Image: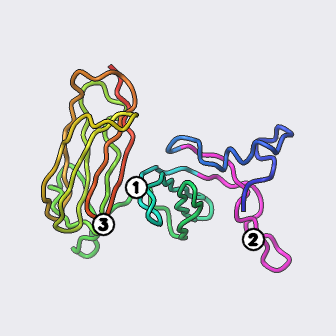
Amino acid sequence: MLDFEDIDEDGDTTEEFLLDSLILPDRSIFKSYKYSFKNGSDYVFAGKKNAMIKFTYWSVVFGDTVLVKIVEYLELFIIEQIAEKFGIVSMRQESPDRFLTGAIINGKKYGTIVSVDEDLSELPLNYKLFPNYPNPFNNSTKITYQIPSLTKAKLIITDILGRTIKLLIDEEKTAGVYQVNFTAENLSSGIYFCSLITSNNIQTIKMIYLK
């Protein structure tokens, strides 16, 4: 189910696999012919579709720590979880979920609700390391993460070579949503990584520091 069509219409189909190899950065939107399969004699999802790389993180897949990208096919509401070396490891079809992380229905709260008036006290259902803000950042940036249950957690900043720059958190955390401020002290401009590490979960985000 790779894109062998001439998506960019330049007369060359040999480079189309590059678009499908997820080399593009997060929030990029590219064209795809995936899922143009037949239902009987009719093509159900024929033609070009918009695919968006939602975000990237590190995860353990079949015992190997690999880079994973989440890709959503916008017209189809299909979301793929694609791991390097392994390909598609999960797929689901649901309504768009780019903005809503929680809701209050008939007075009952669901999910994680983050707002100016909210104290982030809602209990999350899973581990999550959110993108830092601002990013790129000039001096300091805020890092938000959530923990679903009591666990030992580490929050580590590393450079592009994997060297530890700063250990932000190394302690037991109860279920909740937390926010940490990271200040870049004596660092060179460039790409850095923040990793949330627990006993059974590793998530990593990319941060760009500009002096």
- Residue that mark 3 sits on: 126
Q: CA distance from mark 3 to mark 1?
A: 17 Å
- Mark closer to the chain start, 1 or 2: 2
- Residue that mark 1 sits on: 99
Picture residue at 40% right of the left edge, 34% below the top:
160
Which amino acid is tagged 3?
Asn
> What secondary structure is found at the residue carrying circle 3?
loop
Camera-side residue of 104 and 110: 110
Disc on res. 44: 2
Camera-side residue of 120 and 132: 132
Which amino acid is tagged 2?
Val
Picture residue at 23% right of the left edge, 21% below the top:
186
Disc 1 packing (10 Å; few <14; some 14–19; many ≥20): few
Left or right, 18 with respect to 189, comes to right
Picture residue at 51% right of the left edge, 45% below the top:
27
Left or right, 176 with respect to 52, comes to left
Q: Is residue 38 magenta?
A: yes
- Mark closer to the chain start, 3 or 1: 1
Q: Is residue 66 magenta?
A: no
- Mark closer to the chain start, 2 or 3: 2
Residue 80 picture location, percent across and down: 55, 62
